[in-house]
Amino acid sequence: MSGPPAPNFVEVRDLSLAYLHEDGWLQVLSGVSFSIAPGEVLGLVGESGCGKSTLAYQLLGYRPPTAKLLSGQVRLGGADLLAMSRAELDRRRGNRVALIPQNPASALSPGMRVGRQVAEVLTAHRRAVGRSAAMAQVVQLFEAVGLPDPPRILRRYPHELSGGQQQRVAIAMALACGPDLLVLDEPTTGLDVTTQQQIIALLTELRRRKRMAMLYVTHDLGLLAQIADRVGVMYAGQMVEVAPTRVLFLQPRHPYTRGLIASIPQLRPGERVGKPLRGLLQRDELPPGCPFQPRCDFAEAACAAELQVLEEAAPGHEVACRRWRALASPVAIPLPIAGEAVQAAQMPLLALEGLAVTYVSAGSMFAKPVSAVRDLTLAIERGETLALVGESGSGKSTVARAISGLLAPSSGQILFKGERLAGRLRQRPRALRRTIQYVFQNPDASLNPRMRVGAILARPLEVFFEARGADLRGRIDGALQDVRLDESYAQRFPDQLSGGERQRVAIARAVIAEPELLLCDEVLSALDVSVQANILDLLKRLRAEHHLSMLFISHDLAVVREVADRIAVLFRGELCQIGPARAVFQAPMHPYTHALLMAAPSGPAALAGLVRAPEPAAAPKAPSDAACPYAGRCAWQAGEICEREPPPWLDAGNGSHIRCHLSLAELEARALWRAEPQPAGPPAAAEERAAP
Amino acid sequence: MTLSAAPRLVRAPLPSWRRLIRRSPLSLRIGAVILALHAMLAVLGPWLAPYGISQMGTGIPLSGMSWAHPFGVDQLGRDIFSRVIHGSHIVLLLSLTGTGLGVIIGSVIGLLSGYVGGWIDNIVQRLLEAIISIPFLVLALLAIAAAGPQLAGSPTLVILVVALVYAPRVARMARAAAIEIATRDFVTVARLRGERAWSVMRREILPNASSVLLVEFALRAGYAPVLIGSLGFLGFGMRPPTPEWGLMMAENRALIIITPITVIGPGLALASLVVGLNLFTDGLARLIGRTAPRNPA
């Protein structure tokens, strides 16, 4: 047993668990053992379906009725949770062990004021007697988790709070009784990057102050770099590698861990190491022997024969792979930055001129129209990929919806090959509807669950080409091959596919219409990291094969850097900066671009201490037309002028254009982010430089 | 740290029909058995019944339960049990076709109205609400009166009346479902292709509303025999001597003190059909509603 010799606070031994599946029992945990010392943060990472959430819930002694415990113990301070009665469990849950759930919106009761919900935990565990005493404690808790104006917040209902505030309430609820162990199940997955960073900063600080042990479950390895002491990697219900965080990033031993790390998109050129993961975790058809063997680049015949068990590779570093000694240290593969040399054609494929979109909120006839996008002018050349970047609510999707014809612009115009596009879909000819195709964020919602994949792909062909019979089937097979899916998939329903496969089908449906412009609206953000890398490669290949232009919408700068020729940064519906991808990542940059870059989680870069405390989320001011939209949140304020006048456009000289009152020299001087090309090498380079 | 090689529990998949039965809720199975009995009675009734539909003098009039006459004998000397069996197919056919027609009409109106939205939807909804606000028996009687004496007592009229009563109620449920489904991205994708409302409704919305509509069909079909029976009981449904159960209860209601079984018998038949229909369709809706895999990740 590794770890501190003192009796570990949390001790999981040989835990195996199965779920009742429609065809029988499916084993989701196989002999998992690990421990957490008091005050330690253990990260648990793996693809969806690997059993990490199931494992986390065992620390609360929770199993759904369809689960069967096959073996094992979960000891919390010596007592076995799995052998406890319901009453004994109830005394511990929320009291000594607390859960921070993935989705606070569904974890908080919608019909109850948040203050009362948190007070309920206190009174249930007799930590407070009486309503007023409990409420006084809730106010303190809300202060501790950084909620503004606690006495007012506690009278709110969950839907009146933002996602980040809801998660803070959930954290306050978990902290209410001062638990010894906090179980966090993807606590930041649903939040946008800036909010995510604020929550991480809060958790890090709480951990320092309260010395709580934590189990942090996530699919995002980059995040764990910032918060975890040790990381456990799970695959198909087994722990395949456990190591201190730094060691795991610098010297991953298991091929799966190496694949996971390689799948993290990087903000800097030349940092991607090794090959990203291929294939998918398929729970119901696991091979005998090592479960990872079918996807492993290093597998031998023996791997298929015997199950791998954890063995010590170095003190505190355990790995379940018989070949770990044979695996060389990772090799850096220089990654080409997306090409910038797209020849500017005479006429752009698509041009937005002074585009403005306003919403009239539904429900009220007299509601003031909300302006989502203001005075937006940009162009997409033929064969070019323009990325639109910004936090949620910045109007990125609105732009795509206006281009597609779903939303009519309130002013300005959209030119496609020099001709003005009708605002409404109905007024656009069929050929135009075909040449602009939309890929949505969430493939679960964009594929009709009651249609087979073949029928889904057939619809565009029937509508746009009036294809029939053999021609139709031939084209469907072709499209499936195009996105690397087997022809037999045509017979499947969407719920028989994995998330990545569904997004492939959604992409195939767009490409089958032979479009010239592809609108990709956050197409990766609903997917696992390992799948993201595959889909990104697919998009890049299709773009080249089909000569597509793309509008690529994303909040993830690292992804954008890999795919975009040019980047436009949007804040509250207005453009802050636009320029070639390389130039946008260099100083001088717009203060908002800078804030986004600093907040982006990105594995080794974050590990190397490059993550700064996020800027405070100032109260959003109503943006007046006369001011800089970012003035309310800007840390670099030029002065009063920001509130008074719209900022001018500055030409940075490297193709990048910045809209700011500060001068280029000032912008350059303030930027902490440096994108000097680093010596291409393992992430160790970044690591050593940051080490004190 | 050692890790025991725990056995992997994966069973061979069952054949699909056996899997379907295994997954089916108990209510579906019980309902299916009851409905199968009723269907058998409806088909084989003429051969199974001991006496003819209107055969008189089968026993002593107004006699109660006996082995020869389980539901007794009415004033005219007709065997009630035989008449209940003969009436089985009438009740089944009228209920199912009437409800089916109502669900089809209501679905089309509701799904289109919900998807199209705007002022069309507003007008359609106000009209439907106006119809729903009339108590259903009053509405049925109004419709029968409006149809005139030529049609009175014909099965077509009863079917149309059932459809008229149900369609607006189904339409409201269908509309609610359509509004929810219309916000999903796959509907947006269809709109982006420029598809017409009818096509979007048929291909994208209807298949996803099917479980809601089946539940509607279940609820309504389960109650339709009662509605038809009520019409018969009031003398506005089928005409004597049709062995429609509601009508039979009306014919014998004067005898309820002397030989209660002559009224209870047809009532039992009606009750078992209603219970069977409800169990079956409710179970079916639940089975169909299970699209998402239920095991947590």
Image (cartoon, coloured by chain):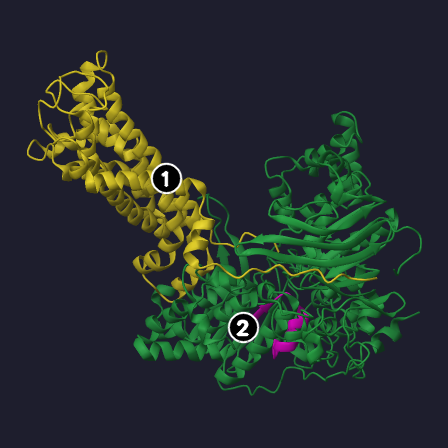
Q: Quadrant of the N terminus of chain A?
A: bottom right
Q: In the rendered image of this protein, does residue B94 appear above or below residue A562?
A: above
Q: In the rendered image of this protein, does residue B36 appear above or below residue A434?
A: above
What colour do you see for chain A?
green
Toward the viewer: A525 or A557? Answer: A525
Toward the viewer: A685 or A623? Answer: A685
Residue of label 2: A551
**Does dot 2 land on a helix, a strand or a loop?**
strand
Residue of label 1: B31
Give residue A609's position: percent from left, percent from top. Answer: 84, 67
Q: Chain of mark 2?
A: A
Question: How many numbered tags mark residues here?
Answer: 2
Q: Mark 1 and mark 2, same subunit?
A: no
The amino acid type, in three-letter code, at marker 2 is Leu
Was residue A284 drawn as part of the magenta stretch in this picture?
Answer: no
Splitting the image into 4 quarters, where does residue B227 fall? Answer: top left
**Residue at (9, 28) in percent of width and height:** B55
Q: In the rendered image of this protein, does residue A30 appear above or below residue B281?
A: below
Give residue A449's position: percent from left, percent from top. Answer: 45, 59
Splitting the image into 4 quarters, where does residue A587 fall? Answer: bottom right
Was residue A554 drawn as part of the magenta stretch in this picture?
Answer: yes
The amino acid type, in three-letter code, at marker 1 is Gly
Residues drawn in magenta: A552-566
Q: Chain of mark 1?
A: B
Between the C-alphas of marks 1 and 2, the distance is: 55 Å
Q: Residue furthest left?
A: B150
Q: Is residue A613 left or right of residue B6?
A: right
Toward the viewer: A102 or A150? Answer: A102
